[in-house]
Image (spheres, rainbow, N blue to C red):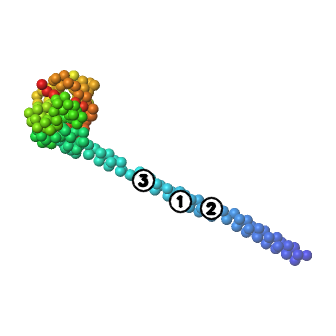
């Protein structure tokens, strides 16, 4: 009887020990989960590299380049490269005045278009060749379109007589209409063409001094 009791106690003790071991193993298994959390945290930190493209500065270079090309030619060179100012360029060369507009001195030029010169030729009843051969007229008319200082459109003194390079004057209204000494008018149709030695404003009529 005693042996049976001892055997029963031993069996119960073994069963309890086995159950305790099983419980311990079950509790300790979830401990591996923090490793997964750590790996996830490390992986999430990698997208920080996406901030690198913000360093792109190429648009600034384009802006600088545009600023530089705005004034790389003299007034004479600008007129010579403009397909609407071919007669003016030829007239300046014929009168020997083209070198003046390629110098470093500062000027404002009110440049008549080819169409403006065409209207003048019709009015005078002469050809372009006859005009270019008339040195006296060219040396009087062309400097009348030049002001020996830089006057941008925003700085035009409206309603005031403006002295030109030949000593005669013109006046400009706030509607951008120029009146010469003979009462003829010309519209300013293009403004602020910047050159290294001044500025060009395009007009639609040739101005004539007295």
- Estimate the spatial distance between the alpha carbons at disc 3 and disc 1, rounded to whole Å: 21 Å
Residue 201: x %, y % from top left: 23, 34
Where 2 falls versus 51 (above or below)? below
- Estimate the spatial distance between the alpha carbons at disc 2 and disc 1, rounded to whole Å: 16 Å
Q: Residues within 10 Å of mark 2 (few under 14, many from 20)?
A: few
| Extreme residue toward the left, this view | 136
Q: Where on the picture, by quarter, is residue 193?
A: top left
Q: Residues within 10 Å of mark 3 (few under 14, many from 20)?
A: few
Residue at which label 1 appears = 43
Residue found 11% across the figure and 28% down from its top = 167
Q: Are marks 2 and 1 in contact (CB under 8 Å)?
A: no
Is any part of residue 174 visible from this angle? yes
* Of pointers 3 and 2, the one earlier in the residue sequence: 2
Residue at which label 2 appears = 33
Determine which of the numbered discs, if any, sits on residue 94 in the image. Answer: none
Residue at which label 3 appears = 53
Q: Nearer the viewer, residue 192 or 133?
A: 133
């Amino acid at each position: 009887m005693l042996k049976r009791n001892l055997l029963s106690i031993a069996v119960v003790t073994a069963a309890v020990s086995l159950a305790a071991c099983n419980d311990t193993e079950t509790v300790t298994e979830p401990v591996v989960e923090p490793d997964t959390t750590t790996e996830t945290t490390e992986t999430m930190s990698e997208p920080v590299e996406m901030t690198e493209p913000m360093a792109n500065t190429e648009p600034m270079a384009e802006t600088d380049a545009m600023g530089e090309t705005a004034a790389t030619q003299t007034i004479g060179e600008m007129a010579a490269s403009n397909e609407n100012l071919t007669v003016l360029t030829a007239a300046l060369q014929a009168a020997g005045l083209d070198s003046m507009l390629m110098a470093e001195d500062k000027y404002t030029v009110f440049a008549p278009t080819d169409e403006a010169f065409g209207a003048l030729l019709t009015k005078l009843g002469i050809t372009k060749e006859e005009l270019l051969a008339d040195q006296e007229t060219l040396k009087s008319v062309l400097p009348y379109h030049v002001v020996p200082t830089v006057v941008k459109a925003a700085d035009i003194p409206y309603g005031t007589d403006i002295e030109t390079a030949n000593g005669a004057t013109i006046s400009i209204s706030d509607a951008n209409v120029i009146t010469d000494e003979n009462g003829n008018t010309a519209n300013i149709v293009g403004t602020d063409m910047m050159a290294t030695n001044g500025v060009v404003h395009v007009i639609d009529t040739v101005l004539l001094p007295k």
